[in-house]
Image: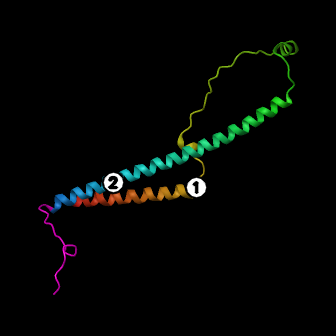
Amino acid sequence: MPKKTSEQQEFFMRINNPNTFRRNLLEASKDTLNILKQIYNVRQIREVKQELINRINKEIGELKVLVQKIDELMPQHTKEELIKKFPELSFKKKSKEVVVPERTMEKAKPKAKPGVEKHVSEIEKLSKAIDEVQKRLQNL
């Protein structure tokens, strides 16, 4: 029989309290799965946020083009000339505050993409895995 080298030898370690060890291992697994679930949630929120930013930037670009067209089409008059021609108009300075209606993320979400569905399924898988670990912990 050939002798085994130290690399080929198998090592065994005795665990004094296997139930405690298993409980600690399952709790660590549960914490890891919870962290992964939170990471997927953050990723999904970031994707929605990026889509909203892209859509807003596109609309701002369109508004800039429209404002340029209005400036080109409007005749150029001074403020005094406009007051003489239209005395009923008031030329007060407007405040620079922009009121944005409050919307929840649910309303502002764009249509779901396949990538988002992938994240949802990953979150569901993680939730199921967390539930399984929780059941194992309760059985100990």
Q: Is residue 11 magenta?
A: yes
Return the residue at label 2. 32
Element type at marker 1?
A: loop
- Relative to 4, is 39 on the left or the right? right
In the image, 71 versus 132, the foreground residue is 71
State the image coordinates of residue 107 (x, y, percent, origin top left). 57, 43
Q: Is residue 129 magenta?
A: no
Element type at marker 2?
A: helix
Where are the magenta residues, as a range? 1-17
In this view, 51 is above or below 99: below
State the image coordinates of residue 96 (x, y, percent, origin top left). 64, 22
Q: Is residue 15 visible?
A: yes
Quadrant position of residue 123 = bottom left
Q: Quadrant of the C terminus?
A: bottom left
State the image coordinates of residue 88 (x, y, percent, origin top left). 82, 14
Task: Single out the mark in the foreground, 2 or 1.
Answer: 2
Q: Residue at x 45, y 58 (%)?
A: 122
Q: Residue at x 54, y 48 (%)?
A: 47
Q: Amino acid at mark 1?
A: Lys
Q: Quadrant of the N terminus?
A: bottom left
Q: Residue at x 18, y 79 (%)?
A: 4
